[in-house]
Amino acid sequence: MSPSVIMETHDKVGLIRINRPEAFNALNDEVMDGIGSALAGFEADEAIGCIVLTGNDKAFAAGADIAAIKDFGYMDTYKADFITRNWERIKTCRKPIIAAVAGYALGGGCEIAMMCDMIFAAENAKFGQPEIKLGTLPGAGGTQRLPRAIGKAKAMDLCLTGRMMDAVEAERCGLVARIFPTDRLIEETLAAAQTIASYSQPVVMMIKEAVNRAFETSLTEGLLFERRSFHASFALEDQKEGMTAFIEKRKPVFKNR
Ligand code: DAK
């Protein structure tokens, strides 16, 4: 049996493929544990500067595996710390993660895409929070990250009707950073990820932390956090190298320190 999560290395980029094509990449514990250990592996690997999470041409992920969870009782979910235990590993990764979404990103699939730092979509991508049709509600951040990404009106529309949103609408309302033809999604996403991975890793991590701070704090506190991180960047050898290389009209060679 092929593994439900595949890890590939492309130069400085770690690629994680969800691989349950027979079930539209529905997310079970094996997949989520696999994503978690792949992320841990890429985080520990100093040669990796950016991570891409993807599915296949038909589905990024069609949500939590309904067959696996349908008979759960409250105590099963509470005692096993369902969702929090392994799904939230994506959130704690310090290296940037790009979700490359083709096909369906529904329910938990849309939610794990939103846990990533940005979403690149194929033209055939479809996003939605259809849990309401199953008699439940989004449980991995859909009601919280969606309004922050696309505003209350669209978030209410998606969560309350369960309808799907295509890539063009998703980009228009800010859920998606870029759209590519479906057959070019991985190539283009890897190219953007290589660009990010070519920069100073500590600076990349500081930028990720600072942007994420914008969703957790007031403007004044967020600006202070940004300013201190900016000041701290002047302690980096990479800042000296970056500015010296600019003056000397050459490409910088970053050492990640
Ligand atoms: N889980 C399990 N199997 C799935 C699946 C899913 N989410 N989505 C698709 N499949 C399976 C189908 O059962 C079918 O299997 P076979 O019959 O071939 O064995 C196969 O994939 C192909 O699906 P379809 O025959 O339905 O194919 P279509 O092209 O007609 O439709 C579809 C594709 C993706 C539009 C459709 O399959 C679909 O609507 N899938 C369900 C999407 C969905 O509702 N996703 C949200 C899942 S709920 C929590 C509790 C719950 C949750 C979170 C927290 N707590 C207690 C805290 C739930 C989160 C969710 O994500």
Image (tube, helix red, strand yellow):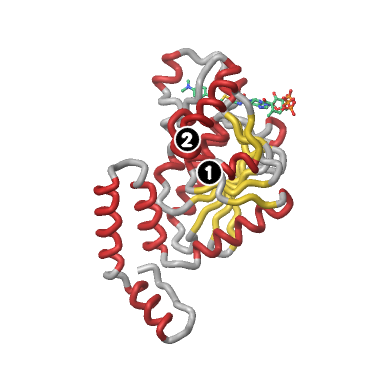
> Mark 1 near ligand 1 (CB under 8 Å)?
no
Q: Position of residue 232 (x, y in %)?
A: 26, 64
What residue is pinned by disc 1?
174
Q: Residue at x 44, y 40 (%)?
A: 89
Badge 1 crowding class, 10 Å Cα cut-off, few under 14, some 14 to 19, many 20 or more, is: some
Q: Which mark is residue 131?
A: none
Q: Quadrant of ligand 1?
A: top right
Q: Name the amino acid type tagged 2.
A: Gly
Quarter in which the C terminus is drawn: bottom left
Above-or-below relation of 236 to 154: below
User: Dot 2, how many residues are within 10 Å of its Cα: few (below 14), some (14-19), or many (20+)?
Assistant: some
Who's the residue at 55% across and 59% down the image?
A: 193
Q: Quadrant of residue 226?
A: bottom left
- Mark 1 vs 2, N-terminal side: 2
Residue 227 locus on image (x, y percent): 27, 59
Q: Residue at x 55, y 41 (%)?
A: 173
Q: Is residue 75 above or below residue 52?
A: above
Task: Report the residue at 47% width, 13% height from top.
Answer: 73
Q: Quadrant of residue 113?
A: top right
Q: Is residue 69 above or below residue 191?
A: above
- Pointer 2 residue: 151
- Nearer to me, 194 or 29: 194
